[in-house]
Amino acid sequence: MALEYAYHPGNVAHSGSPEVAESMIPLAKSLGIKLTYLEGATSCGAGIIRQANEKLQLTLNARIFAQAESLGLEIMTPCASTAGNLSEDLFRLKSDPILLAEINDVLMKTCGMEFNGETSVNHLLHVIVDEIGLDKLKSMVVNPIDFRVASYYGPNMQQDGFCGEDDVYDPEYMEMLMKTLGGKNVDWESRMQSVGAPSILTEESTVLKLSASVLNDAKSEGAQLIVSACNLSHSVMDIYQGKASQRTGLNVNIPVVHLCEILTFALGHYNTRFAQLRTRVMVIGD
Amino acid sequence: MSANRSLLVLFGSQSGNAEDLASKVGKAASKYGLEATVKGMDEIKITDLAGQKRIMICCSTWGEGEQPDNAEDLWISANAEDSPSMEGVNFSVLALGDTSYELFCESGKEWDSWLESKGGFRVYQRVDCDVDYEAPAKEWMDETLARMGAVDDSGTYQESLVEEIKNQASGSASTTVSSESNGSDSSIEISTDGDRSMTILFGSQSGNAEGLAAKFAKQAKSYGLDAEVADMDGFDLSSLSSKKRVLIICSTWGEGEQPDNAEELWQKAVAASPGLLNGVHYSVLALGDTSYELFCESGKEWDKRFEELGATRLVDRVDCDVDYDKISQVWAEDALASMAAVDGEGLFHEEMVQAIKDSMISDSTGASGEDGFTVPIIKSEAIRAEISIFRYDPSTSSTGRDTWICALPGHMSILDVLRTLKNTQDGSLTFRDGSLDDPTTAITINGRHVLPGNMRLDSVAPIRDGGISIKIEPLSGFEVIRDLVVDHWSLETKREASKPWMASATRKGLSTPQGAIGSMSPLVASELHSITDIHSYPILHSSSDATAHSDEYLGPAIISHAWARRNDPRISSQKKKEIEILLDSPNGIKAETDLSTIRRQGKGTKIHDSLLDCKTSSLARTGYNGRHGKHVWWYAVTVKSSGKVNDTVLYRQVLGPIGLLGNLFSGVTSRMVLGFTRTGGNMINDILAFVAPPAGLGKMPRQFNSSINNHHEVVAIFNELDGRF
């Protein structure tokens, strides 16, 4: 039976990371996942709206949960930040019945909705490993990813209760997945370090140093490519590479792609793009 | 141990019994010189069985002779036409079943026949177990493991070696696993390592609950627990937030009322915030009288409230009638064993509970010690550990790693691991030694900040393929002096600069028989306590990834302390103002780049929440001005306006024209337009690409978002909750 999820593409999939939203479509088809779009879903808040008003972000996200609940579906997203932010708010609502009742009052008054705690949040990575299975994935691989890959998780979804059956501090799901796709994993330490994505516009100096240290670590360990499970971090690591290098003097030039992209390439989609990536990895380097 | 000594233990399990047995086989295998891998039948492919030299199968039967759910797919593969040969595989099968069903142990029989038909060699006869399976299963495990041990590295079974291996295994067991001698297959004893404190709270009207609390506190010693009996009267509820183990024994008074000495604490518990008791493990014994309408009501209330406050119930509440002696003792044995299975770091090891109970039964005749009770030690078997430690030699400014692969007891603390390596392997290995909870000993293991004295080796990382692999680093955010020793001076300097001392306001004291004293609402005190309940300031400082990359940033440890001071009702208005200036400064809370990094570290949730409050407060005080304020403000505004964040508006409003130009010249904009598209994708995404480039080109965000469905609902939520946006 096909898996079906209420789909949240992530906070910036409609803007700075269109490749994630785009590649998710053929990927889901290949994996046998039916995506039911949450057309009314808002931004997850990215941990930013709650800085102004925590109850506001909780209510906006409770509305997303209520939409998924009404469909009888669990939520899936390919973005680690969105998965982490939604999971954090879902955990708060489920563990505090008084707060949930307050939020439901607002939801009922403004949207005629109610959330009863009957959904959950999943990242694509955990859906593939826990639900679909790597054996099945392996049988689908058309173009093996024969690169040395540094898998990047980020800090948002590597939290207790947010990362499926994987270990919070010593995860292995992405490495297992990359091995299944034919990649060679590099052993690196920065795979869960923040690149400071929520503060790229406000604390640029620190964020560039954070990003440079992550990129440089992957490169120093021999990685040819970083694969990110996070839309936001993926964007920051890629588009700020030059600026990070200028600020720190570190060698940080390395291709960064999103998990969705690398999966689609491996499963035989976008062969031209994969060839371009292969050229970047093998010849150009950045 | 060489790969040639590998043993595959497979389980097909429906209710968990076969899995438990397979796990025991896996643990016992090392005594027979075997390196076991335990897998569910749904975790392996049939082709993976070929090439194995030793396979032990524990399989239950489901329904009318059917394979258990997790074995079904493997069984189908096994019966496919192209299923592989099992020649060279030495095997034995333990079949679990129930004679009340017609097809008894059918699944196990099927696997046994299949392996034989495929050319496998049966080293020990299949054993079929009824519902009382423990004894025959133990015999099968011992006999089969000895035979598997007698399969040599080339895969040939050497029957002549079986007795010798049995003798070796029993010798090994008697010296390393004390509870084995009693017929229990537990390899676990009880530990006195780390924090073993437990609080027994009693709410008592007639003295029965108090008597039981004292009795069970005494019994707790034999479980390796250091129990403290506490009267609910005058007890500080907030102090429970730092406890790992709490037992509650509470009677009920009158018509379902709390006993007199519990009433005040109960009111505090009712008013307390959810999450106060996160990390606390508890169980409740309720005393009552069935002749009253509301039986054991007080105990029931405590049980429910503790759960609501975030505590974890380890053993279900037991409600006692007036004849409570026996039933309360049964509860105590369950509760104490479970509490003993909570380690020094506060992690509950469910798999240890039964072994601890078995250990207590076997120790019942061996009372010793001054108090007449044995104090056993929790021990677990040696595990293979690959330990990689960061090294730094300041004399040569060289860095690197040393890696040791060794077998160490799983119960060993990381501090003891370091001591052992220093004493036996490399005397130059440098780390801070100290007491178990010395905050300055903190190190990082696989990205997790820990106090090494409080962390067991087998709890610090997942055990994979029978071993554990750990990387030990110095705490980030500090300068390294040598190896794992960091210099805390930078933190202390920041702490000093933050002027963390209290400057109290002059205020009226409360007149009491003891004189005039200052008072504080219990709720406020509890909240302040939770903000400052920081086990190790160096760990909290390091939990922010930003501290390692910003010398000026004060860091979460200093900020959370200052935030607690700022919220202390005793503080003077001048001091409060000083602290607010500190928090609002560029090196204050706004310099934290990603609060999620703090949340993920141990007990960081509460600190994360308080830092979030701190930032909210700071943004409001500074009128959402400056980049931080504009960022939050415009993020919320764009979400209100369409339901989605609008990156273009954010960039424009936060960075301003100069910042945008900076991005243009530093290559950020060009990477979005060009570089970011090198894996392909459309170059033209929007008609704006022709009208107002670079919007719509490559991966430049669109200038205008389309609205989400039912956008009016979002506007209504904003208007209801925050009219500012």
Image: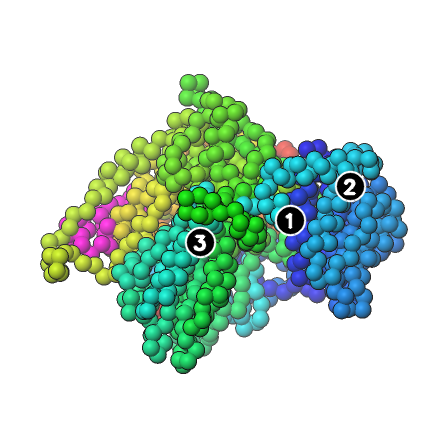
Which chain is home to disc 3? B
Question: Do the CB atoms of the residues marked 3 and 1 lie less than 8 Å apart?
Answer: no
Compared to B382, does B324 lie above or below?
below
Is residue B371 or residue B8 the one in the foreground?
A: B371
Q: Residue at x 53, y 49 (%)?
A: B365
The reply to whether residue B104 is visible in this rendering is: yes
Q: Which mark is residue B219?
A: 3
Q: Nearer the viewer, mark 3 or mark 2?
A: 3
Q: Residue A116, position in %: x, y? A: 49, 72
Q: Residue at x 38, y 37 (%)?
A: B435
Compared to A102, does B647 lie above or below?
above
Q: Which residues are magenta?
A: B565-589
Compared to B664, does B43 lie above or below?
below
Asked whether, in this view, residue B91 is left or right of residue B622, the answer is right
Q: Residue B15, position in %: x, y? A: 66, 62
Q: CA distance from mark 3 to mark 2?
A: 42 Å
Residue position for label 2: B147
Which chain is home to disc 1? B
Q: CA distance from mark 1 to mark 2?
A: 20 Å
Residue position for label 1: B183
Badge count:
3
Q: Residue at x 41, y 69 (%)?
A: B287
